[in-house]
Amino acid sequence: MSQELEAILALKQWNENIVGQLKMITEGKESFKVQGSDGQIIDVPKKHNKGIRMGVTIALEMIEKFPVEINEKPQCPECLSYVDQEELDMFCGFCEDCNENDEE
């Protein structure tokens, strides 16, 4: 697996985790707490709960759909057909059909 694909998969996993956490916040009914710089836990006044949930909802809408789609098989850049990675590697990044057309 390429380093690029590993990085994308790691980002996708991070995104799924964050989206799950944000959904729990928007769906929850509990009051919010924050941790101060000294480590002390502080209750957020209830009057701020609605604003916090609205902010989290906006953030969720912005990041919920991961911007990269990963297909099981890569596409040939010439004809856009899905082929095995081994075929692309064998023919310098193109499928066998496009490679044959290029040689003619």
Image (spheres, rainbow, N blue to C red):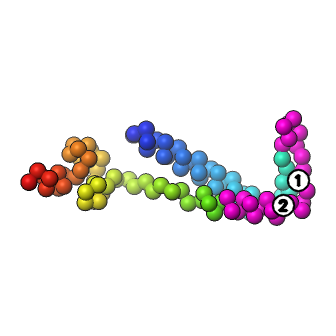
- Left or right: 88 with respect to 45? left
Residues marked 2 and 1 touching at CB (< 8 Å): yes
Viewer-closest of 58 and 69? 58
Q: Nearer the viewer, residue 75 or 102?
A: 102
Vertical placement of 5 versus 63: above or below? above
**Residue 38 figure quarter:** top right
- What amino acid is at disc 2? Asn
For marks 2 and 1 on the same chain, the one whose residue lies earlier in the sequence? 1
Q: Position of residue 24 (x, y in %)?
A: 72, 57
Label count reads 2
**Residue 25 position by quadrant:** bottom right
Residue 29 visible in rendering: no
Image quarter in which the N terminus is found: top left
- Residue at x 69%, y 53% (from the top left corner): 21
How would you rate the neighbour count of disc 1 (Cα within 10 Å): few for under 14, some for 14-19, many for 20 or more?
few
Quarter of the C terminus within the rendering: bottom left
- Residue drawn at (69%, 56%) of the image: 22
Per the image, label 1 sits on a secondary structure element best described as loop
User: Which range is magenta?
Assistant: 35-59
Q: Amino acid at mark 1?
A: Val
Residue at image mark 2: 49
Q: Position of residue 5 (x, y in %)?
A: 43, 44
Please give the name of the residue rendered at 49% of the width and 46% of the height, measured from the top-left corner. Answer: 9
Q: Is residue 3 left or right of residue 66?
A: left
CA separation in Å, label 2 and label 1:
8 Å
* Residue where numbered disc 1 is placed: 44
